[in-house]
Amino acid sequence: MGKLFPRTLSFVFFSLFFIFIAGMAMFGWNNGTHSLEKKTARPMTAVKPSTDSKPATDVVNVPEQDQGSTPDPLMQTTLKLPDGKVIEPLQPVRWKDLSLQLIVTSLPPVDQNDSGYGYQSIISNHSTAVSTETVTTSAGEGTLVLCETTPPAASGSTDVTYSYWVIVYGSQYAYAIDAAILGNKNDAKNEVLNLLNGWKVPK
């Protein structure tokens, strides 16, 4: 019995020590690990976009023609008057006995009788060619057409007007000077012919 009691006491002591260590281990795991989970398991926070970033629309490549910055060069035709004024398409200008306007249009159908382009589809509606002749311009050889125009029946007018058309043909478009006659027809013709050296037409 004397020898057994110290052994029993030692066993109890080591058992209590083991329980204490195990309890501390369990307590430390619960507090440490659980608290760590609480610290790391934070809710996600949305990151605000940088104010330096640009909207997507700013980086989209927009064709230059949609911006209107690069017009079709084949549509660029001008007529320089003796006084230095430059006329562009669809800008009517009064010059002496004429009302001038530049026109760019699609190429007309080929005239089978003339082996070239027909001008009838270019000149104004209700117009009839009185005379035609070939003239020389700074844009090359052109056709000078004297037109007689009668107003449509619905207008109730019977006044006949006259105009000169000078027409040249490019690779994709037809170019014309529409010169409505406001005065003497003979004077108007000379005025038109004197303007042809200042006419620029794309090749």
Image: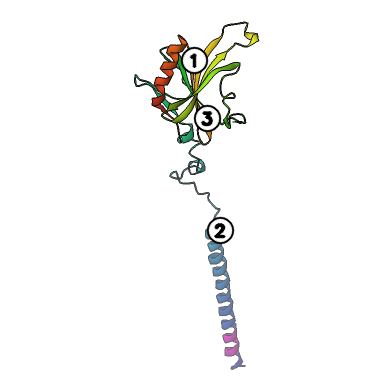
Does any portion of residue 3 appear in the rendered image?
yes
| Mark 2 or mark 1, whichever is nearer to me | 1
Q: Residue 201: horizontal and vertical position, in percent?
A: 45, 31
Q: Secondary structure at mark 2?
A: loop
Residue that numbered label 2 is attached to:
41
- Cα distance between the residues tagged 1 and 3: 19 Å
Q: Write the start and end of the magenta stretch as one range.
A: 5-11
- Magenta region includes residue 10: yes
Residue that numbered label 3 is attached to:
174
- Cα distance between the residues tagged 3 and 2: 76 Å
Q: Residue 168: horizontal and vertical position, in percent?
A: 49, 29
Query: Tag 1: residue type?
Result: Ala
Query: Tag 3: residue type?
Result: Ala
Residue at 54%, 28% in the rendered image: 105
- Cα distance between the residues tagged 2 and 1: 86 Å
Q: Quadrant of residue 125?
A: top right
